[in-house]
Image (tube, rainbow, N blue to C red):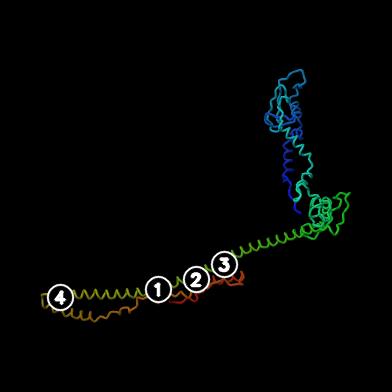
Amino acid sequence: MNFTVGFKPLLGDAHSMDNLEKQLICPICLEMFSKPVVILPCQHNLCRKCANDVFQASNPLWQSRGSTTVSSGGRFRCPSCRHEVVLDRHGVYGLQRNLLVENIIDIYKQESSRPLHSKAEQHLMCEEHEEEKINIYCLSCEVPTCSLCKVFGAHKDCEVAPLPTIYKRQKRQELTLPRLEGSGTNMTYCSLDLLDSSNPPILTSQNTNITGSELSDGIAMLVAGNDRVQAVITQMEEVCQTIEDNSRRQKQLLNQRFESLCAVLEERKGELLQALAREQEEKLQRVRGLIRQYGDHLEASSKLVESAIQSMEEPQMALYLQQAKELINKVGAMSKVELAGRPEPGYESMEQFTVSVEHVAEMLRTIDFQPGASGEEEDEEVALDGDEGTAGPEEERPDGP
């Protein structure tokens, strides 16, 4: 049975009324303002009787209003802000009344005297009969409905019961049923004394299908289901944290592996560069030695040619003949000097130091994760790789290219 809401109740009515009541409390008597209410120059309010009591206590020599002696006034401090209030000769009776606060007090008292339950019951109205309240319960259809629906409407052939009776019956059954507390197996029971003793327990007939056990069992199932879901969520959050920790650890291990591999490559590159530098130095020393040898021979031959030319220009025949014989011997000996052989063709080439890294690069590209490897084994492998990276190349290092 569908029903509509006649008006929207203000959810904050009770809270708002409590806050309003706190604002209507006199700071002296701590009760709601009693009329007339006077307003002080500092804009705080007091009951006139309370204000007069404070004024009389602060000015004991001030004469009352009915006295024949006219006083010049007096002063006292506001109990809310301690502001000093100066009064004229009329005293407290010279203060203005706060009619707005008095009207608010009247409205508050009228609203407070209204029964709360009557307001709560007015918002349940029948959808088919808009002027009818929901006041009965259909036992056959298990829905609340109105009287007209029972007499003329869809529930005229159904068995019905007063709505308060079904409400009390369900509440009574909820209290008498064991209620689950927490997630354990301990059960607690509520006493029937909580209900009105004038309403004895009503046995549920077969037609009355709505029971407190269904609602209690449903709530218990939902609570248990929520606990299981929360436990699963907690486990999955722990799994996420574990995944992050393991991933961080494996990243560190992977970086260490590749750093050790790079260290091996750098070391091997240095070794090959040293071998290439040694070969370069050996070839350069040999060629430079030949250059010096050929240079010395060229210098000696040039001097001998110069000496021979000067001897041929000698005008004295005896001296010329004496020097010519010696020069002829020197020229003959110089022409017979054998120089060291030149470097063979291709001696300057360094092609033998070419390194092929294609197969190594292809092998590096095949590096992949090994499934099933534990963290401890990986740590040991990292340590072994580090040892091999330092000692292995020295033991198996070739002497030359």
Q: Secondary structure at mark 3?
A: helix
Of tags 3 and 1, the one toward the viewer is 3
User: Which residue is painted at 16% across and 80% down in the image?
Assistant: 325
Rendering coords of residue 304 (x, y %): 20, 75
Q: Secondary structure at mark 1?
A: helix
Mark 3 Cα-neighbour bin, 10 Å: few <14, some 14–19, many ≥20: some
Q: CA distance from mark 3 to mark 1?
A: 38 Å
- Vertical relation: 333 (above or below) 51: below
Amino acid carrying label 4: it is Ser
Rendering coords of residue 18 (x, y %): 74, 41
Q: Earlier in the sequence, mark 3 or mark 4?
A: 3
Q: Earlier in the sequence, mark 4 or mark 2?
A: 2
Q: Nearer the viewer, residue 91 or 308?
A: 91
Mark 2 Cα-neighbour bin, 10 Å: few <14, some 14–19, many ≥20: some
On residue 64, the disc is none
Rendering coords of residue 113 (x, y %): 79, 39
Rendering coords of residue 237 (x, y %): 65, 61
On residue 253, the disc is 3
Q: Earlier in the sequence, mark 1 or mark 4?
A: 1
Mark 1 highlights which residue? 278
Amino acid carrying label 3: it is Leu
Amino acid carrying label 2: it is Val
